[in-house]
Image (tube, grey):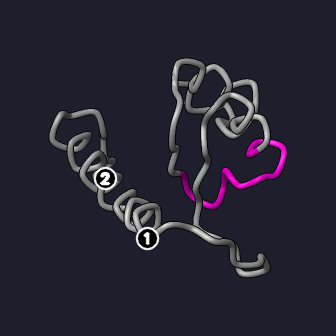
Amino acid sequence: MPKANVDERNPKHIKKMTRQLFGKLFADKGYLSKALWEMLFRDRVQLFTKLRKNMKNHIMTMEDKILLRKRAIIETINDLKKVNDGQLFLNSA
């Protein structure tokens, strides 16, 4: 994972994070770009995101739609795990 002050949407960082992956990658709208989609597709990774308001709808299987919805649940669980593991420090001042 890149450092917190690095833009993780940078194609160089994404290439490094996904170099051993193949299949489906579910991300939020912030990762959506044609160049990134094409780069991942060449590397046998399908990028799935929710559409932005100004975008045309595209065909997606029901399974992929369900998995995209599950991404939010997984993120919530990971956030809770970080809090419970003491990785997240809150300023109580």
Q: Which mark is residue 74?
A: 2
For marks 2 and 1, give the CA distance: 18 Å
The quarter holding residue 67 reads: bottom left
Residue lying furthest right = 35
Query: Residue 64, how many percent across, how many down?
Result: 46, 61
The quarter holding residue 16 reads: top right
In the rendered view, would you say 63 is above or below 46? below
> In front: mark 2 or mark 1?
1
In the rendered view, would you say 50 is above or below 93? below
Q: Name the magenta segment's main secondary structure.
A: helix
Q: Secondary structure at mark 2?
A: helix
Residue in the foreground of this view, choosing between 26 and 22: 22
Query: Which residue is found at the position 63% from the left and 32% from the top?
Result: 44
Q: Secondary structure at mark 1?
A: helix
**Residue 86 covered by magenta stretch:** no
Q: Which mark is residue 62?
A: 1
Query: Which residue is found at the position 56% from the left and 57% from the top?
Result: 28
Name the side, left or right, on which 85 lies relative to 50: left
Q: For the residue marked with disc 1, what is the amino acid?
A: Met
Query: Which residue is found at the position 79% from the left and 80% from the top?
Result: 54
In the rendered view, would you say 73 is above or below 36? below
The quarter holding residue 71 reads: bottom left
Query: Residue 4, how many percent across, how many down?
Result: 56, 32
Query: Residue 92, how many percent across, how many down?
Result: 28, 52
**Residue 36 covered by magenta stretch:** yes
Residue in the foreground of this view, choosing between 11 and 89: 11
User: Callout 2 environment at 10 Å: few (<14), some (14 to 19), or many (20+)?
Assistant: few
Query: Which residue is found at the position 75% from the left and 32% from the top?
Result: 11
User: Callout 1 environment at 10 Å: few (<14), some (14 to 19), or many (20+)?
Assistant: few
Query: Across the whole image, how many numbered discs are drawn on residues?
Result: 2
Q: For the residue marked with disc 2, what is the amino acid?
A: Ile
In magenta, the rendered stretch is 27-37
